[in-house]
Amino acid sequence: MSKGFRRAAQVCIYQVRRQLFSSRAGFLLLLFAAYFYLNEEGIRNFCRDVQVNAVPLAFPFLTNDWICQMILAGGFLWLVMPLGSQEAETDYMKFRAGDNSWNFGNCLAVFASAVVYTGILIVISNVVLFPYLGLETGWGRIWRTLAFTDASWKYGVQLVIDKLIIKEFTPVGAVALSFCLEVLCLTWLGSLMYVVNSRTGTVAGFMVL
């Protein structure tokens, strides 16, 4: 491993820790837990009435909702907003790493943060269905019923359960594809914000996006 790459990896670890163990991360965790809980209330009520548990597969439907997607992306950009801006506490690390390793390390940090962020979202989006979580083969009775009947409308389910997702994808395939696409989307937006922030030395990238 080259010296430059090793320094970039150290910058990445340093920045990921700063972002994911910050007060912003804690606030976002509570905010999204409340958002998902309210968004999936109708599903919990349906599970309770029919006495059938849901398979933990909410994430593909959440990311298929453009409003939810904007909220998730906005939360991520707010989380990694300090990257690229001029902060006194990062000056020493930047000086030691050098400009190239510093920039490369921050780009790696954006990607790593997107992976962890998306993984946490998958967990939260399913945990809020507790205690109505269970295991079944395939998509399970709950998601199929909500997708192919008017049960979603009757129970006021805010989440759009698109039957096309169930028809075209296996559960594992849908979750994996949603995870990859979310990570790529967040990485692209975060990298764009980082470029603007690093050029201006401020958090202007967050304002622009």
Image (cartoon, rainbow, N blue to C red):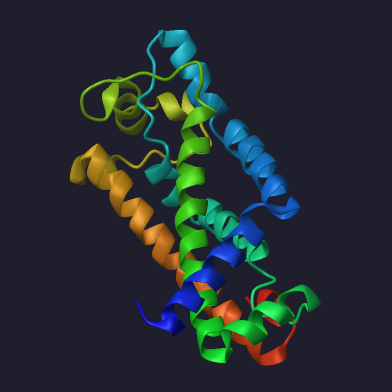
Viewer can see residue 156: no
Q: Work out whether 48 lies above or below 61.
A: above
Image location of residue 161, percent across then percent down: 39, 38
Image location of residue 131, percent across then percent down: 50, 16
Q: Name the one closer to the observer, 65 or 7.
A: 7
Viewer can see residue 111: yes
Q: Work out whether 13 lies above or below 32.
A: below
- Residue 4 occupies which quadrant of the picture? bottom left
Q: Residue at x 37, y 12 (%)?
A: 52
47 relative to 21 in the view: left or right: left
Q: Residue at x 49, y 56 (%)?
A: 66
Q: Name the one closer to the observer, 49 or 105.
A: 105
Q: Name the one closer to the observer, 56 or 93.
A: 93
Q: Residue at x 42, y 79 (%)?
A: 5
Q: Give the residue at the far right of this rendering.
A: 88
109 relative to 148 in the view: left or right: right
Image location of residue 93, percent across then percent down: 66, 77
The quadrant of the picture occupied by the C terminus is bottom right
73 relative to 176 in the view: left or right: right
The quadrant of the picture occupied by the N terminus is bottom left
Q: Residue at x 38, y 22 (%)?
A: 54
Q: Work out whether 27 lies above or below 5.
A: above
Q: Name the one closer to the observer, 205 or 70.
A: 205
- Residue 72 occupies which quadrant of the picture? bottom right
The number of numbered badges drawn on the structure is: 0
Q: Work out whether 190 lies above or below 30.
A: below
